[in-house]
Amino acid sequence: MTSTNTLPRVSAAEVRARLGEPEEMIKAKIGDRIDPHARRFIAHSPFLTLATADAAGRADCSPRGDYPGFVKVLDGRTLALPDRPGNKIADSFRNIGENDGVGLLFFVPGMRETLRVNGSAYVTDDPDVLARMRTEAKAPVLAIVVDVAEVYFHCGRALIRSRLWDPASRALAAELPSAGEIAAEKMNLEPALLDQLLEDGYRKLY
Amino acid sequence: MQKTILERIERVTDDVVSLVLRGDEGPLAPWEPGAHIDLELPNWLTRQYSLCGDPGDLSAYRIAVRHDPLSRGGSEYVHLFLQPGRTLPVSLPRNHFPLHPAAEYLFVAGGIGITPIVPMLRSAVASGAAVTLAYAGRPFAAELSSAYGERVRLGRPDLAALAAEFPAADVYCCGPASMVDAAEAAFPAVHTERFEPTRRTFGPDTPFEVGCARSGGTIQVPADESLLDALNHAGRQVPSACREGVCGSCEVIVLEGEPEHRDDIGAAAGRMYPCVSRALSPRLVLDV
Protein backbone atom coordinates (compact mmCIF):
# COMPACT_ATOMS: atom_id res chain seq x y z
CA MET A 1 0.00 0.00 0.00
CA THR A 2 1.20 3.54 -0.81
CA SER A 3 2.01 5.84 2.07
CA THR A 4 -0.78 8.41 2.58
CA ASN A 5 1.47 11.40 1.95
CA THR A 6 2.71 10.08 -1.36
CA LEU A 7 -0.58 9.12 -2.97
CA PRO A 8 -0.61 9.99 -6.65
CA ARG A 9 -1.81 13.54 -7.30
CA VAL A 10 -3.96 14.14 -10.37
CA SER A 11 -3.61 17.60 -11.90
CA ALA A 12 -6.68 19.76 -12.50
CA ALA A 13 -6.17 19.47 -16.26
CA GLU A 14 -5.99 15.68 -16.01
CA VAL A 15 -9.12 15.59 -13.82
CA ARG A 16 -10.98 17.61 -16.45
CA ALA A 17 -9.72 15.28 -19.17
CA ARG A 18 -10.94 12.23 -17.30
CA LEU A 19 -14.36 13.60 -16.32
CA GLY A 20 -15.12 15.35 -19.60
CA GLU A 21 -16.86 18.70 -20.00
CA PRO A 22 -20.17 19.39 -18.25
CA GLU A 23 -23.17 19.65 -20.53
CA GLU A 24 -24.15 23.14 -21.65
CA MET A 25 -27.49 22.67 -19.87
CA ILE A 26 -25.69 22.21 -16.56
CA LYS A 27 -23.63 25.34 -17.06
CA ALA A 28 -26.74 27.29 -18.05
CA LYS A 29 -28.52 26.50 -14.80
CA ILE A 30 -26.16 28.72 -12.82
CA GLY A 31 -28.03 31.94 -12.10
CA ASP A 32 -26.78 35.18 -10.59
CA ARG A 33 -29.81 36.02 -8.47
CA ILE A 34 -32.34 34.52 -6.05
CA ASP A 35 -35.23 33.64 -8.37
CA PRO A 36 -38.67 32.65 -6.99
CA HIS A 37 -37.74 28.94 -6.89
CA ALA A 38 -34.54 29.60 -4.97
CA ARG A 39 -36.44 31.94 -2.67
CA ARG A 40 -39.05 29.28 -1.92
CA PHE A 41 -36.27 26.76 -1.27
CA ILE A 42 -34.54 29.12 1.19
CA ALA A 43 -37.88 29.88 2.88
CA HIS A 44 -38.27 26.16 3.65
CA SER A 45 -34.67 25.41 4.58
CA PRO A 46 -33.87 24.98 8.29
CA PHE A 47 -30.23 24.02 7.69
CA LEU A 48 -27.21 24.97 5.63
CA THR A 49 -23.48 24.62 5.62
CA LEU A 50 -21.37 27.76 5.38
CA ALA A 51 -17.94 27.50 3.80
CA THR A 52 -15.41 30.26 4.35
CA ALA A 53 -11.63 30.57 3.96
CA ASP A 54 -8.96 32.71 5.54
CA ALA A 55 -6.62 35.12 3.73
CA ALA A 56 -4.33 32.23 2.76
CA GLY A 57 -7.26 30.24 1.37
CA ARG A 58 -7.34 27.72 4.21
CA ALA A 59 -10.95 26.58 4.23
CA ASP A 60 -13.51 25.93 6.92
CA CYS A 61 -17.12 24.76 6.86
CA SER A 62 -19.71 25.11 9.61
CA PRO A 63 -23.36 24.14 10.09
CA ARG A 64 -26.09 26.76 10.56
CA GLY A 65 -29.67 25.94 11.48
CA ASP A 66 -32.93 27.32 12.82
CA TYR A 67 -36.58 27.37 11.79
CA PRO A 68 -37.24 27.11 8.02
CA GLY A 69 -36.59 30.48 6.42
CA PHE A 70 -34.16 31.59 9.12
CA VAL A 71 -31.98 32.92 6.31
CA LYS A 72 -33.64 36.10 5.10
CA VAL A 73 -33.78 37.08 1.45
CA LEU A 74 -33.31 40.85 1.58
CA ASP A 75 -33.56 41.19 -2.20
CA GLY A 76 -32.77 39.18 -5.32
CA ARG A 77 -29.05 39.50 -4.76
CA THR A 78 -28.75 39.66 -0.98
CA LEU A 79 -29.17 37.15 1.85
CA ALA A 80 -28.72 37.55 5.59
CA LEU A 81 -27.84 34.79 8.10
CA PRO A 82 -28.39 35.28 11.84
CA ASP A 83 -25.53 34.52 14.17
CA ARG A 84 -27.04 32.38 16.92
CA PRO A 85 -25.07 31.52 20.06
CA GLY A 86 -22.50 28.85 19.26
CA ASN A 87 -19.07 27.97 20.51
CA LYS A 88 -17.75 31.56 20.16
CA ILE A 89 -14.76 30.30 18.20
CA ALA A 90 -16.12 32.46 15.38
CA ASP A 91 -14.01 30.89 12.63
CA SER A 92 -16.51 32.05 10.03
CA PHE A 93 -16.41 35.65 11.24
CA ARG A 94 -12.63 35.68 11.37
CA ASN A 95 -12.40 34.23 7.87
CA ILE A 96 -14.96 36.63 6.42
CA GLY A 97 -12.90 39.48 7.90
CA GLU A 98 -9.89 38.25 5.94
CA ASN A 99 -11.53 36.85 2.83
CA ASP A 100 -15.10 37.63 1.84
CA GLY A 101 -15.69 34.58 -0.37
CA VAL A 102 -18.39 32.24 0.98
CA GLY A 103 -20.22 29.15 -0.24
CA LEU A 104 -23.61 28.13 1.15
CA LEU A 105 -25.35 24.79 0.69
CA PHE A 106 -29.01 24.81 1.70
CA PHE A 107 -30.94 21.65 2.65
CA VAL A 108 -34.68 21.05 2.94
CA PRO A 109 -35.52 17.88 4.88
CA GLY A 110 -37.06 15.34 2.55
CA MET A 111 -35.79 17.13 -0.57
CA ARG A 112 -33.07 15.38 -2.53
CA GLU A 113 -31.85 18.45 -4.37
CA THR A 114 -29.86 21.10 -2.54
CA LEU A 115 -29.38 24.79 -3.30
CA ARG A 116 -25.93 26.26 -3.69
CA VAL A 117 -25.31 29.96 -3.25
CA ASN A 118 -21.85 31.49 -3.65
CA GLY A 119 -20.96 35.09 -3.09
CA SER A 120 -19.12 37.58 -0.95
CA ALA A 121 -19.97 38.26 2.66
CA TYR A 122 -19.67 40.89 5.34
CA VAL A 123 -20.87 41.17 8.93
CA THR A 124 -23.60 43.65 9.90
CA ASP A 125 -25.47 44.84 12.98
CA ASP A 126 -28.18 46.68 11.04
CA PRO A 127 -31.17 46.88 13.40
CA ASP A 128 -33.77 46.19 10.69
CA VAL A 129 -31.92 43.09 9.53
CA LEU A 130 -31.51 41.85 13.11
CA ALA A 131 -35.19 42.58 13.86
CA ARG A 132 -36.20 40.14 11.12
CA MET A 133 -34.21 37.43 12.90
CA ARG A 134 -35.74 37.86 16.34
CA THR A 135 -36.75 34.57 17.96
CA GLU A 136 -37.89 33.88 21.48
CA ALA A 137 -38.09 37.68 21.85
CA LYS A 138 -34.31 37.90 21.36
CA ALA A 139 -32.54 39.37 18.36
CA PRO A 140 -29.10 38.14 17.33
CA VAL A 141 -26.26 40.59 17.87
CA LEU A 142 -24.72 40.10 14.43
CA ALA A 143 -25.70 38.84 11.01
CA ILE A 144 -23.75 37.75 7.95
CA VAL A 145 -24.86 39.44 4.74
CA VAL A 146 -24.14 37.63 1.49
CA ASP A 147 -23.96 39.47 -1.82
CA VAL A 148 -25.01 36.71 -4.17
CA ALA A 149 -22.90 35.88 -7.24
CA GLU A 150 -24.01 32.35 -8.14
CA VAL A 151 -27.19 30.42 -7.39
CA TYR A 152 -28.00 26.94 -8.58
CA PHE A 153 -29.79 23.76 -7.64
CA HIS A 154 -27.53 20.78 -7.11
CA CYS A 155 -28.80 17.41 -8.31
CA GLY A 156 -29.99 14.88 -5.76
CA ARG A 157 -27.60 11.99 -6.43
CA ALA A 158 -25.48 12.52 -3.32
CA LEU A 159 -28.55 12.63 -1.10
CA ILE A 160 -30.11 9.64 -2.82
CA ARG A 161 -26.94 7.56 -2.45
CA SER A 162 -26.50 8.67 1.15
CA ARG A 163 -30.14 7.87 2.07
CA LEU A 164 -29.91 11.07 4.08
CA TRP A 165 -33.66 11.48 4.60
CA ASP A 166 -34.46 7.79 5.05
CA PRO A 167 -35.65 7.42 8.67
CA ALA A 168 -33.85 4.06 8.84
CA SER A 169 -30.54 5.89 8.36
CA ARG A 170 -30.92 7.40 11.82
CA ALA A 171 -29.86 4.03 13.25
CA LEU A 172 -26.29 4.96 12.28
CA ALA A 173 -26.10 7.41 15.19
CA ALA A 174 -26.56 4.57 17.67
CA GLU A 175 -23.22 3.14 16.50
CA LEU A 176 -21.31 6.25 17.62
CA PRO A 177 -20.10 7.21 21.07
CA SER A 178 -21.87 10.24 22.53
CA ALA A 179 -20.27 13.67 22.13
CA GLY A 180 -19.46 13.53 25.85
CA GLU A 181 -17.65 10.21 25.45
CA ILE A 182 -15.61 11.57 22.53
CA ALA A 183 -14.64 14.72 24.42
CA ALA A 184 -14.03 12.85 27.68
CA GLU A 185 -11.19 10.88 26.08
CA LYS A 186 -9.42 14.09 25.13
CA MET A 187 -10.10 15.94 28.39
CA ASN A 188 -9.78 13.05 30.82
CA LEU A 189 -13.19 13.79 32.35
CA GLU A 190 -16.29 11.83 33.23
CA PRO A 191 -18.32 11.25 29.99
CA ALA A 192 -21.67 11.48 31.80
CA LEU A 193 -20.71 14.87 33.23
CA LEU A 194 -19.74 16.17 29.78
CA ASP A 195 -22.94 14.84 28.24
CA GLN A 196 -24.92 16.59 30.98
CA LEU A 197 -23.06 19.87 30.38
CA LEU A 198 -23.70 19.52 26.66
CA GLU A 199 -27.42 18.85 27.16
CA ASP A 200 -27.67 21.82 29.54
CA GLY A 201 -26.01 23.96 26.90
CA TYR A 202 -28.41 22.70 24.22
CA ARG A 203 -31.34 23.92 26.34
CA LYS A 204 -30.38 27.51 25.58
CA LEU A 205 -30.58 27.80 21.84
CA TYR A 206 -31.06 31.56 21.55
CA MET B 1 -55.89 22.26 17.37
CA GLN B 2 -58.52 22.36 14.65
CA LYS B 3 -57.79 21.26 11.11
CA THR B 4 -58.61 23.76 8.39
CA ILE B 5 -58.02 23.92 4.65
CA LEU B 6 -56.87 27.20 3.14
CA GLU B 7 -59.72 27.72 0.70
CA ARG B 8 -58.56 30.97 -0.85
CA ILE B 9 -56.28 33.95 -0.50
CA GLU B 10 -57.66 37.32 -1.59
CA ARG B 11 -55.73 40.54 -1.99
CA VAL B 12 -57.20 43.31 0.17
CA THR B 13 -54.59 46.04 -0.41
CA ASP B 14 -50.99 46.11 -1.71
CA ASP B 15 -49.71 44.66 1.54
CA VAL B 16 -52.75 42.88 3.03
CA VAL B 17 -54.29 39.57 2.04
CA SER B 18 -57.33 37.87 3.49
CA LEU B 19 -57.44 34.11 4.07
CA VAL B 20 -60.51 31.88 4.21
CA LEU B 21 -59.80 28.81 6.36
CA ARG B 22 -62.50 26.18 5.93
CA GLY B 23 -63.09 23.68 8.72
CA ASP B 24 -62.02 20.24 7.54
CA GLU B 25 -63.80 18.25 10.24
CA GLY B 26 -67.24 19.87 10.48
CA PRO B 27 -68.07 23.21 12.08
CA LEU B 28 -65.24 25.16 13.69
CA ALA B 29 -65.28 26.26 17.33
CA PRO B 30 -67.55 29.24 17.99
CA TRP B 31 -66.09 32.66 18.70
CA GLU B 32 -67.11 36.13 19.79
CA PRO B 33 -66.06 39.39 18.08
CA GLY B 34 -62.56 40.42 19.17
CA ALA B 35 -61.23 36.85 19.26
CA HIS B 36 -58.03 35.63 17.64
CA ILE B 37 -56.55 32.28 16.66
CA ASP B 38 -53.05 30.83 16.45
CA LEU B 39 -52.21 29.79 12.91
CA GLU B 40 -49.52 27.12 12.55
CA LEU B 41 -47.54 27.80 9.42
CA PRO B 42 -45.62 25.18 7.42
CA ASN B 43 -42.33 26.85 8.45
CA TRP B 44 -42.94 25.90 12.11
CA LEU B 45 -43.89 29.45 13.07
CA THR B 46 -47.14 30.09 14.94
CA ARG B 47 -48.76 33.45 14.49
CA GLN B 48 -51.83 35.10 16.00
CA TYR B 49 -54.50 36.65 13.81
CA SER B 50 -57.81 38.25 14.75
CA LEU B 51 -60.90 36.69 13.28
CA CYS B 52 -62.52 39.20 10.92
CA GLY B 53 -65.31 37.15 9.36
CA ASP B 54 -68.84 36.38 10.47
CA PRO B 55 -69.17 34.62 13.86
CA GLY B 56 -72.49 33.20 12.61
CA ASP B 57 -70.71 31.16 9.93
CA LEU B 58 -68.69 28.40 11.58
CA SER B 59 -67.92 26.62 8.31
CA ALA B 60 -64.85 28.85 7.92
CA TYR B 61 -62.69 31.42 9.70
CA ARG B 62 -61.51 34.56 7.96
CA ILE B 63 -58.32 36.41 8.86
CA ALA B 64 -56.37 39.23 7.23
CA VAL B 65 -52.58 39.44 7.22
CA ARG B 66 -50.39 42.45 6.53
CA HIS B 67 -46.96 41.80 5.03
CA ASP B 68 -44.66 43.27 7.65
CA PRO B 69 -41.51 44.64 5.95
CA LEU B 70 -39.58 43.50 9.03
CA SER B 71 -41.24 40.07 8.96
CA ARG B 72 -39.42 37.33 10.84
CA GLY B 73 -41.05 34.80 8.55
CA GLY B 74 -44.75 34.72 9.52
CA SER B 75 -46.47 37.34 7.38
CA GLU B 76 -43.82 36.95 4.68
CA TYR B 77 -44.62 33.24 4.49
CA VAL B 78 -48.35 33.91 4.24
CA HIS B 79 -47.84 36.44 1.46
CA LEU B 80 -45.17 34.71 -0.62
CA PHE B 81 -45.37 30.98 -0.06
CA LEU B 82 -48.70 29.83 1.32
CA GLN B 83 -50.77 27.96 -1.28
CA PRO B 84 -54.53 27.39 -1.39
CA GLY B 85 -55.57 23.83 -0.65
CA ARG B 86 -53.01 23.38 2.08
CA THR B 87 -54.03 22.02 5.49
CA LEU B 88 -53.41 24.54 8.25
CA PRO B 89 -53.91 23.75 11.95
CA VAL B 90 -55.47 26.57 13.97
CA SER B 91 -56.07 26.87 17.70
CA LEU B 92 -59.39 27.33 19.43
CA PRO B 93 -60.32 31.03 19.40
CA ARG B 94 -59.20 33.10 22.41
CA ASN B 95 -60.61 36.49 23.24
CA HIS B 96 -58.66 39.13 25.17
CA PHE B 97 -60.63 41.92 23.50
CA PRO B 98 -64.31 41.11 24.10
CA LEU B 99 -67.14 43.51 23.31
CA HIS B 100 -69.04 44.53 26.45
CA PRO B 101 -72.73 45.48 26.40
CA ALA B 102 -73.12 49.26 26.00
CA ALA B 103 -75.54 51.86 24.69
CA GLU B 104 -72.82 53.72 22.81
CA TYR B 105 -69.57 52.51 21.23
CA LEU B 106 -66.53 54.26 19.84
CA PHE B 107 -64.05 52.15 17.89
CA VAL B 108 -60.62 53.53 17.02
CA ALA B 109 -58.53 51.52 14.59
CA GLY B 110 -55.31 51.92 12.67
CA GLY B 111 -54.13 49.85 9.70
CA ILE B 112 -54.36 46.08 10.09
CA GLY B 113 -55.69 46.72 13.63
CA ILE B 114 -59.07 46.96 11.92
CA THR B 115 -59.36 43.15 11.80
CA PRO B 116 -60.85 42.47 15.27
CA ILE B 117 -62.92 45.65 14.96
CA VAL B 118 -64.77 44.44 11.83
CA PRO B 119 -66.92 41.82 13.61
CA MET B 120 -67.13 43.97 16.77
CA LEU B 121 -68.55 46.82 14.71
CA ARG B 122 -71.08 44.54 13.05
CA SER B 123 -72.17 43.13 16.40
CA ALA B 124 -72.39 46.57 18.00
CA VAL B 125 -74.52 47.93 15.16
CA ALA B 126 -76.77 44.86 15.32
CA SER B 127 -77.31 45.46 19.04
CA GLY B 128 -78.98 48.77 18.22
CA ALA B 129 -76.36 50.83 20.06
CA ALA B 130 -74.99 54.14 18.79
CA VAL B 131 -71.75 53.27 17.00
CA THR B 132 -68.85 55.29 15.59
CA LEU B 133 -65.65 54.01 13.98
CA ALA B 134 -62.63 56.30 13.57
CA TYR B 135 -60.27 54.50 11.23
CA ALA B 136 -56.89 55.45 9.82
CA GLY B 137 -56.10 52.75 7.30
CA ARG B 138 -56.96 51.22 3.96
CA PRO B 139 -57.86 47.55 4.54
CA PHE B 140 -61.66 47.15 4.38
CA ALA B 141 -62.14 50.96 4.48
CA ALA B 142 -64.39 51.07 1.40
CA GLU B 143 -66.49 48.07 2.51
CA LEU B 144 -66.98 49.48 5.99
CA SER B 145 -67.93 52.90 4.66
CA SER B 146 -70.48 51.48 2.27
CA ALA B 147 -71.92 49.14 4.92
CA TYR B 148 -72.10 51.60 7.81
CA GLY B 149 -72.23 55.01 6.10
CA GLU B 150 -71.70 57.99 8.36
CA ARG B 151 -70.89 55.84 11.34
CA VAL B 152 -67.46 55.37 9.73
CA ARG B 153 -64.98 58.26 9.81
CA LEU B 154 -61.90 57.65 7.73
CA GLY B 155 -58.56 59.37 8.16
CA ARG B 156 -56.26 60.07 11.06
CA PRO B 157 -58.47 60.52 14.14
CA ASP B 158 -58.18 63.46 16.53
CA LEU B 159 -58.36 61.43 19.74
CA ALA B 160 -58.83 64.42 22.06
CA ALA B 161 -61.76 65.65 19.95
CA LEU B 162 -63.28 62.15 19.94
CA ALA B 163 -62.92 61.91 23.72
CA ALA B 164 -64.78 65.20 24.07
CA GLU B 165 -67.46 64.22 21.54
CA PHE B 166 -68.16 60.75 23.02
CA PRO B 167 -67.71 61.09 26.79
CA ALA B 168 -70.12 58.22 27.55
CA ALA B 169 -69.04 55.73 24.86
CA ASP B 170 -67.41 52.40 25.55
CA VAL B 171 -64.10 52.80 23.67
CA TYR B 172 -62.13 50.08 21.85
CA CYS B 173 -58.81 50.64 20.16
CA CYS B 174 -56.61 48.38 18.04
CA GLY B 175 -53.75 49.56 15.88
CA PRO B 176 -50.04 50.33 15.91
CA ALA B 177 -48.40 50.76 19.30
CA SER B 178 -48.24 54.53 18.89
CA MET B 179 -52.00 54.75 18.34
CA VAL B 180 -52.83 52.44 21.26
CA ASP B 181 -50.49 54.45 23.51
CA ALA B 182 -52.16 57.70 22.40
CA ALA B 183 -55.65 56.23 22.96
CA GLU B 184 -54.72 55.13 26.46
CA ALA B 185 -53.64 58.70 27.17
CA ALA B 186 -56.66 60.36 25.51
CA PHE B 187 -59.54 58.32 26.95
CA PRO B 188 -60.23 57.79 30.65
CA ALA B 189 -60.99 54.11 29.92
CA VAL B 190 -60.28 52.20 26.73
CA HIS B 191 -60.24 48.51 25.78
CA THR B 192 -57.16 47.80 23.71
CA GLU B 193 -55.56 45.00 21.80
CA ARG B 194 -51.90 45.04 20.82
CA PHE B 195 -50.39 42.93 18.06
CA GLU B 196 -46.83 43.55 19.20
CA PRO B 197 -45.28 43.79 22.64
CA THR B 198 -44.94 47.22 24.21
CA ARG B 199 -41.35 48.36 24.53
CA ARG B 200 -40.86 48.63 28.26
CA THR B 201 -38.01 48.14 30.65
CA PHE B 202 -38.15 46.01 33.75
CA GLY B 203 -35.86 45.48 36.67
CA PRO B 204 -33.09 42.94 36.25
CA ASP B 205 -34.15 39.31 35.89
CA THR B 206 -33.60 37.53 39.18
CA PRO B 207 -33.83 33.84 40.04
CA PHE B 208 -36.89 32.52 41.87
CA GLU B 209 -38.45 29.19 42.64
CA VAL B 210 -41.74 27.66 41.59
CA GLY B 211 -43.74 25.09 43.46
CA CYS B 212 -45.75 22.78 41.20
CA ALA B 213 -49.07 22.19 42.97
CA ARG B 214 -50.41 19.56 40.59
CA SER B 215 -47.31 17.60 39.61
CA GLY B 216 -45.38 18.14 42.84
CA GLY B 217 -41.81 19.30 43.21
CA THR B 218 -40.02 22.63 43.06
CA ILE B 219 -38.35 24.18 40.04
CA GLN B 220 -35.55 26.74 40.23
CA VAL B 221 -35.86 29.44 37.58
CA PRO B 222 -32.42 30.94 36.89
CA ALA B 223 -32.03 34.62 36.02
CA ASP B 224 -31.22 33.89 32.40
CA GLU B 225 -34.13 31.55 31.69
CA SER B 226 -37.81 32.33 31.22
CA LEU B 227 -40.35 30.74 33.54
CA LEU B 228 -41.91 29.08 30.50
CA ASP B 229 -38.61 27.49 29.46
CA ALA B 230 -37.86 26.42 33.03
CA LEU B 231 -41.27 24.74 33.30
CA ASN B 232 -40.88 22.96 29.98
CA HIS B 233 -37.32 21.87 30.71
CA ALA B 234 -38.51 20.43 34.00
CA GLY B 235 -41.07 18.34 32.14
CA ARG B 236 -44.16 20.46 32.90
CA GLN B 237 -45.33 20.99 29.35
CA VAL B 238 -46.98 24.39 28.96
CA PRO B 239 -48.18 25.23 25.45
CA SER B 240 -46.94 28.50 23.99
CA ALA B 241 -47.03 30.45 20.75
CA CYS B 242 -45.85 34.06 20.58
CA ARG B 243 -43.40 33.81 23.50
CA GLU B 244 -43.52 37.58 23.87
CA GLY B 245 -46.57 38.19 26.03
CA VAL B 246 -49.20 39.09 23.47
CA CYS B 247 -51.10 35.92 22.52
CA GLY B 248 -52.07 34.41 25.88
CA SER B 249 -51.61 30.77 24.90
CA CYS B 250 -49.25 29.94 27.81
CA GLU B 251 -51.59 31.13 30.59
CA VAL B 252 -51.09 29.37 33.95
CA ILE B 253 -52.94 29.64 37.26
CA VAL B 254 -51.08 31.21 40.18
CA LEU B 255 -51.97 29.77 43.59
CA GLU B 256 -49.43 31.54 45.80
CA GLY B 257 -46.84 34.28 45.50
CA GLU B 258 -46.73 37.54 43.60
CA PRO B 259 -46.05 37.44 39.84
CA GLU B 260 -44.32 40.28 38.05
CA HIS B 261 -46.60 40.70 35.04
CA ARG B 262 -44.73 41.72 31.91
CA ASP B 263 -47.35 40.76 29.33
CA ASP B 264 -49.49 42.99 27.13
CA ILE B 265 -52.65 40.98 27.63
CA GLY B 266 -53.47 42.11 31.15
CA ALA B 267 -53.42 38.93 33.20
CA ALA B 268 -56.55 38.36 35.25
CA ALA B 269 -56.16 37.92 39.02
CA GLY B 270 -54.64 34.54 39.75
CA ARG B 271 -53.28 34.08 36.21
CA MET B 272 -49.95 34.77 34.57
CA TYR B 273 -48.14 34.39 31.24
CA PRO B 274 -44.84 32.62 31.96
CA CYS B 275 -43.26 33.38 28.56
CA VAL B 276 -42.41 36.91 29.74
CA SER B 277 -43.61 37.28 33.33
CA ARG B 278 -41.46 36.49 36.35
CA ALA B 279 -41.87 36.83 40.12
CA LEU B 280 -41.74 39.64 42.65
CA SER B 281 -41.83 37.19 45.54
CA PRO B 282 -39.01 34.65 45.93
CA ARG B 283 -41.47 31.80 45.35
CA LEU B 284 -44.57 31.18 43.27
CA VAL B 285 -46.87 28.21 43.45
CA LEU B 286 -48.48 27.38 40.11
CA ASP B 287 -51.24 24.96 39.14
CA VAL B 288 -48.97 22.86 36.99
Image (spheres, rainbow, N blue to C red):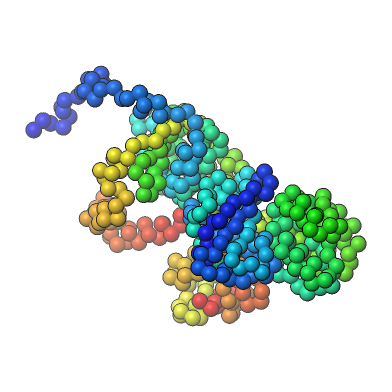
Q: Please, is residue B155 above or below residue B217 in the view?
A: above
Where in the figure is residue B3, as x and y percent of width and height? 50, 64
B78 or A94, nearer to the observer? B78
Where in the figure is residue B23, as x and y percent of width and height? 54, 65
Q: Please, is residue A20 above or below residue A50 in the view?
A: above
B150 or A193, nearer to the observer? B150
Q: Residue at x 74, y 49 (%)?
A: B138
- Name the image quarter holding residue A105: top left
**Number of numbered labels in the structure image:** 0
Q: Is residue A181 visible?
A: no
Where in the figure is residue A45, as x and y percent of width and height? 44, 46
Q: Residue at x 25, y 43 (%)?
A: A161
A119 or A22, nearer to the observer? A22
B167 or B216, nearer to the observer? B167
Lateral position of residue A118 relative to residue A160, left or right: right
Q: Residue at x 25, y 22 (%)?
A: A20
In this view, the residue farthest toward the left is A1
Q: Please, is residue B172 above or below residue B216 in the view?
A: above
Q: Residue at x 36, y 38 (%)?
A: A61
Lateral position of residue A3 relative to residue B203, left or right: left
Where in the figure is residue B81, as x and y percent of width and height? 52, 47
Q: Is residue A39 visible?
A: yes
